[in-house]
């Protein structure tokens, strides 16, 4: 039996006590990897609708999405309105200064596509970007705070491209509600107030514009219930409504971004040309077969679909329906997770820059990997496998982990079009640099800080123009070629575990979506098995410890949003751990 550690905050010391350093994964990187504190745990029930549905991380974003859908807008229209509103009301998680990945189901052509709006490194960045004068990696928070962590934002262009392809309502109509709300103000929610207070000790009050917005005149973090107006964002959004994304990439806002990243400490090197040359890339979805469904998501530069796909592909050979939810299934999920995370660390990165194995989802390969799982005892730490790969060459595993921030929303419109999108500014409040009323991302800290280890290059090292590896896993599950489930979550690298577990609960155990996402979260990044600290989670943790897992109990703050598309209705759920909501008709 291994030791079980309970830690409300999952401190670095607790992780170290539980596990010691693991392959490329120290206690400190794990601490950075895990998400923000849970804010709301009121019981909820799934919501049903017949025509359309939206679920997102803030009630005001859901309301505007619902209004757009009710006016005959498409899922693309609603996504634009939801994301514009989230920039205002959930500023710590996503916004116009960040990026994301969006899956779009086009009912007319019965096709699924993915949009890669991941932030991009400046052309002048090189592999020494995160090394100090002695050639040592910067500490994480020293890297985050300041303009150097800012990549070219993708979200403004993503929304424009989406609207141009699939929009039905006038562009300005989709932005206007966020403009009005920014002028009128919104109430600081408990979650936002808590996040501001937490981030104060991590540099949120470093820069004038950010301090002036999130703190009062005495320098205290804004309290829950404060009416917060954002006239700067209202002006930015008006420009966006009038001129689209161009000002962000070639105009006044681009110039402001380039000036803003030149912070006194940790200055950035973004140039106007980096912004002007940015493109949103449409890519084919990456899909894996699971229980007679196709589970489709975002390929590189996200590791999401590949890692979720590996976990499910390995579990395909276990009869989870017969096994049922409980410690045995939790053990299998976590063991598959550690095998998948070992491959992720070694192989996965922006495939436009590094060659990656073709066979990461190969059925035979995953069957061989699954054979390494002992149904009764944890393997401890997994090693990467040797997937089919013509162009194989030596690599070193990555030691960096994506961190907190991020949001997920799902939308179905009356025409049958659908969106599953995860967007982010990376850490809560991104780089802390604010311009035009919105925060700039710190996505460049999603790269490996070390370019190599033991003389071998790390796939996710910094390179000019490259997109950092992500864990974001917006997912659409297809049955008979049509969407059956839309799902995804924020949560740093834990997103992958949250998403895989929700899919298993819905497909294998036929759980109603709210019941599926209410279950205790459990994740591993190929180190300790981290279990959500609830009564049910504590029981699971005891059983897992008896199977040899290094177990840690802690708050695991997912933000899962789901829509199940049944024959005659839509059934949706929002995570009880955050402040999101669901509305449909
Ligand atoms: N920045 C979070 C992620 O991309 O996974």
Image (cartoon, rainbow, N blue to C red):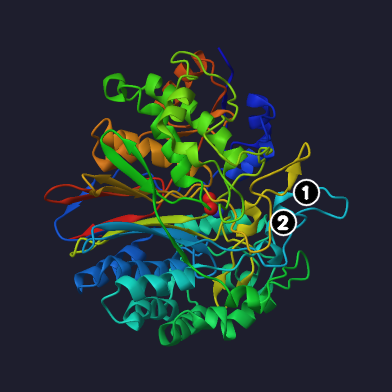
Work out whether mark 1 precedes mark 2 in sequence or the reverse, and give the earlier one. Answer: 1
**Above or below for 160 versus 568:** below
Q: Quadrant of the N terminus?
A: top right
Give the residue at the far front of this rendering: 390
Q: Nearer the viewer, mark 1 or mark 2?
A: 1
* Real-space Cα separation, disc 1 to disc 2, in angstroms: 9 Å
**Image location (x, y in percent) of residue 415:** 18, 65
Dot 1 corresponds to which residue?
Answer: 137
Res. 377 in view = yes
Checking the image for residue 64, the label placed there is: none
Q: Quadrant of the C terminus?
A: bottom left
The residue drawn where x is 31% and y is 19% is: 323
Tell me the quarter of the picture where residue 86 sits: bottom left
The residue drawn where x is 32% and y is 25% is: 325
- The answer to whether 125 appears left or right of 31 in the picture is right
- The answer to whether 68 appears left or right of 85 in the picture is left
The residue drawn where x is 61% and y is 55% is: 353
**Image location (x, y in percent) of residue 399:** 67, 40
Secondary structure under badge 1?
Answer: loop
For disc 1, the neighbor class at 10 Å (few under 14, some 14 to 19, many from 20) is some
**Image location (x, y in percent) of residue 111:** 28, 57
**Above or below for 214 versus 409:** below
**Pick the front one: 240 or 554:** 240
Res. 56 in view = no
For disc 2, the neighbor class at 10 Å (few under 14, some 14 to 19, many from 20) is many
**Image location (x, y in percent) of residue 416:** 20, 60
Secondary structure under badge 2?
Answer: helix
- The answer to whether 41 appears left or right of 139 in the picture is left
**Above or below for 53 versus 182:** above
Dot 2 corresponds to which residue?
Answer: 143
The residue drawn where x is 66% and y is 39% is: 393
**Pick the front one: 212 or 556:** 556
């Amino acid at each position: 039996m291994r030791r079980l550690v309970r830690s409300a905050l999952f401190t670095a010391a607790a992780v170290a006590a539980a596990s010691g350093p693991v392959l490329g994964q120290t206690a400190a990187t794990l601490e950075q990897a895990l998400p923000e504190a849970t804010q709301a745990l009121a019981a909820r029930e799934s919501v049903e609708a017949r025509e359309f549905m939206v679920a997102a991380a803030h009630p005001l974003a859901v309301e505007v999405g619902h209004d757009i859908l009710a006016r005959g807008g498409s899922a693309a229209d609603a996504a634009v309105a939801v994301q514009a509103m989230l920039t205002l009301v959930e500023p710590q998680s996503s916004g116009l200064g960040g990026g994301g990945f969006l899956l779009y189901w086009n009912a007319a052509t019965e096709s699924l596509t993915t949009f890669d709006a991941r932030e991009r490194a400046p052309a002048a960045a090189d592999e020494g970007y995160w090394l100090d004068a002695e050639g040592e990696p910067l500490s994480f928070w020293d890297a985050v705070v300041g303009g150097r962590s800012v990549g070219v934002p993708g979200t403004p262009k993503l929304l424009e491209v989406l609207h141009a392809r699939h929009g039905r309502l006038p562009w300005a109509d989709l932005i206007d509600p966020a403009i009005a709300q920014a002028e009128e103000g919104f109430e600081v929610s408990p979650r936002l107030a808590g996040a501001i207070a937490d981030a104060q000790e991590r540099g949120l009050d470093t820069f004038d514009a950010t301090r002036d917005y999130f703190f009062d005149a005495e320098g205290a973090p804004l309290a829950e219930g404060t009416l917060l107006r954002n006239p700067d964002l209202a002006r930015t959004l008006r420009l966006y409504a009038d001129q689209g994304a161009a000002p962000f990439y070639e105009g006044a806002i681009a110039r402001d971004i380039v000036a803003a990243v030149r912070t006194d400490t940790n200055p950035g090197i973004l140039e106007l040309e980096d912004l002007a040359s940015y493109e949103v890339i449409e890519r084919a979805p990456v899909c894996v077969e699971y229980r007679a469904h196709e589970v489709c998501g975002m390929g590189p530069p996200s590791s999401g679909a590949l890692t979720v796909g590996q976990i499910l592909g390995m579990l395909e050979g276990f009869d989870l329906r017969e096994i049922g939810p409980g410690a045995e299934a939790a053990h299998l999920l976590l063991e598959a997770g550690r095998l998948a995370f070992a491959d992720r660390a070694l192989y996965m990165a922006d495939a436009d820059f590094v060659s990656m194995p073709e066979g990461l989802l190969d059925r035979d390969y995953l069957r061989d990997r699954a054979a390494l799982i002992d149904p009764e005892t944890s393997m401890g730490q997994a090693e990467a496998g040797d997937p089919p790969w013509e162009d194989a060459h030596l690599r070193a595993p990555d030691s960096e982990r994506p961190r907190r921030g991020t949001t997920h929303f799902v939308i179905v419109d009356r025409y049958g079009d659908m969106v599953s999108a995860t967007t982010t500014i990376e850490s809560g409040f991104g780089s802390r640099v604010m311009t035009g009323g919105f925060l700039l991302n710190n996505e460049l800290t999603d790269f490996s800080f070390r370019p190599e280890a033991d003389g071998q290059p790390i796939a996710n090292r910094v390179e000019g123009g490259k997109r950092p590896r992500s864990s974001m896993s917006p997912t659409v599950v297809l049955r008979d070629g049509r969407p059956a489930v839309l799902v995804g979550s924020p949560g740093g690298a834990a997103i992958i575990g949250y998403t895989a577990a929700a899919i298993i609960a819905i497909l294998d155990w036929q759980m109603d979506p709210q019941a599926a996402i209410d279950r205790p979260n459990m994740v591993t990044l190929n180190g300790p098995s981290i279990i959500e600290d609830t009564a049910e989670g504590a029981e699971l943790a005891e059983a897992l410890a008896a199977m040899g897992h290094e177990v840690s109990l802690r708050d695991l703050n997912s933000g899962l949003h789901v829509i199940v598309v049944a024959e005659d209705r839509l059934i949706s759920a929002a995570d009880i751990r955050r402040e999101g909501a669901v509305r449909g008709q």
